[in-house]
Image: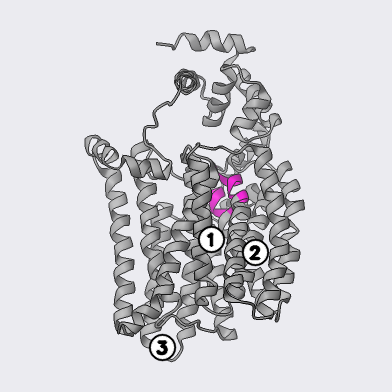
Amino acid sequence: MTESSSSSVLDACEASTGWAQVKACLKATSALWPVIVGLAVGRCSIIVPTYASYVSSDDGIFTDGATLFFSLLALIIICVIAIPDLHLEKKQVRRIMIGTVAAQCALMLVAGFVQLASGPVWARLCINGVNTLFGVIIFGYWLRYVRGARLRVVTVVLFSALALSEVELLACAFLSGMWDNVAAAVLLLAEFPLMRRARRAPLAWEIDTGGPQLLENVSKDRISIARFLISNGLCIAALSLAIGLMRGFPAGLAIPFSLEMRVVCFVAIVAVCAIVIVAVAGRTWRFPFALAMWGVMLLTVTVVLFLYAFLPDRLDAGAAAATALNAFMVVFDWALIVAFMSFGWRDPYYYLLGGIVVFLFFRAVARISEPLLAAWGVDEPHMLVLISILSFASVLVLTGAYVGVLLDERDRVLAQRQSRVLHAVMGIDAEKKPQSLEELRTEAMEANVRKLGERFLLSDREIEVLTLYAMGHTQRKVAEELVISPETVHAHIKRIYAKTGLHSRQAILDFVAQYSE
């Protein structure tokens, strides 16, 4: 996207009001349709074979047992990434994606055959666990495209993908035998042309629709943002335990959905997605995004508890509401992963696998524990109380997150020191120290270039490009470091020259030298 086209989009979004703003925002993000479709298909590649397109609530060992197996595999990969601080290059990510799509297409057909033939438990468990890992890698590929984007762009992409995935899931729910797996595998093959099309589309962070960045309405201070992200991660763990108990209420058995309840669940999810997109794109959403999303999820918790308490003969009503709540948690987890990818310093797949494990692992543990709780005498009223306590615990942690943002500087620094290990595990150290002379040199150059950027009104991305370019990297190397195309780097450098009036790398170095201490 050129500078003039980006400016025209921003002007249109800023000048318009109400529905005109919504239309302008949707038009600006329409170029990201390959990312939206790819993300939707990636989500369905997990749910169709593993969760049977949600024709019922979770099926115990075959779903949540498989989730525990997936969590083990994901933790192994996380260690492989974290211990050497591995960062995958653009070509490696693309090759992993191609291999994963091909492998999952074959695995989905095998999963359908094993289910149809009532294969052994261990085979179904392992197949579903590996299938979940493949699906996570696939939609993680598309989440990488959204990192660094503005809140409005992230919202439109993620909630559109969720709504589109629900359309595919509803269609697959009407297919019998293994035909749902066949249909999902055929749709998964569309990932290949979508990948090619996405490479020609503008990057999400290049689309300037106005409004804040994803974390800008939290704080501009690194310590506050790190504290906020960690707190939201803990909130997800607490509420995931509650969701696990809701999806198998009260004794852990799978609850079949009636046709009308499955349709009602679909309509509710799509309606909420549409409301959120319109509210954020039209700027009628006045609260911080994360706070508003937690409000939506806690309101849905209330609906689930009400249905289970007052409609004991229609458990599918409460289970359908719990499935909708699970979908809202999925899209919020996506947004939080994108925030970690944008703010953190580890490889994006580290945050992807970590974020998904936190959500799915705790949900699976709670779901599998329900038969044990029922055997120990935990009846329906006590189960509802336990769900309420877990939900309330997420509210307390969330409150602590926003209180932490308001703390004074001394208290925040003290909190950061006390949670140094947690910051390192999360990969979002508030004040990451350079580990080598090269990192020290990079930080020094970035500090000097940022001063130049303040003088000539350079954007954050232009400062990142200029820092690497001033250090002697070629335009192709800068593109690899920032995971963007060489053409985009060239366009940034031309704009930098135009803004600063400088016309060579040496001229930039001479100018930056005056800021050196």
Residue 296, percent from left and from top: 42, 65
Residue ID for mark 3: 311
Asked if residue 516 lies in the magenta stretch, the reply is: no
Residue contact between numbered discs 1 and 2, judged by CB atoms under 8 Å: no
Question: Disc 1 to disc 2, how far (Cα)?
Answer: 15 Å
Determine the residue positioned at 68% across, 26% down.
476
Question: Disc 3 to disc 2, how far (Cα)?
Answer: 33 Å
Q: Kindly state the secondary structure of the residue where label 2 is placed.
A: helix
The residue nearer to you, when weighing 309 against 93, is: 93
Is residue 44 something that shows in the picture?
yes
Q: Identify the amino acid type marked 1.
A: Phe
Does residue 432 appear to the left or right of 153 in the view shown?
A: left
Q: Quadrant of the C terminus?
A: top left
Q: Identify the amino acid type marked 3.
A: Leu
Q: Quadrant of the N terminus?
A: top right
Residue ID for mark 1: 70
Q: Residue 369 is drawn in which quadrant? A: bottom left
For marks 1 and 3, the one nearer the N-term is: 1
Residue 297, percent from left and from top: 42, 65
The residue nearer to you, when weighing 112 against 441, is: 112
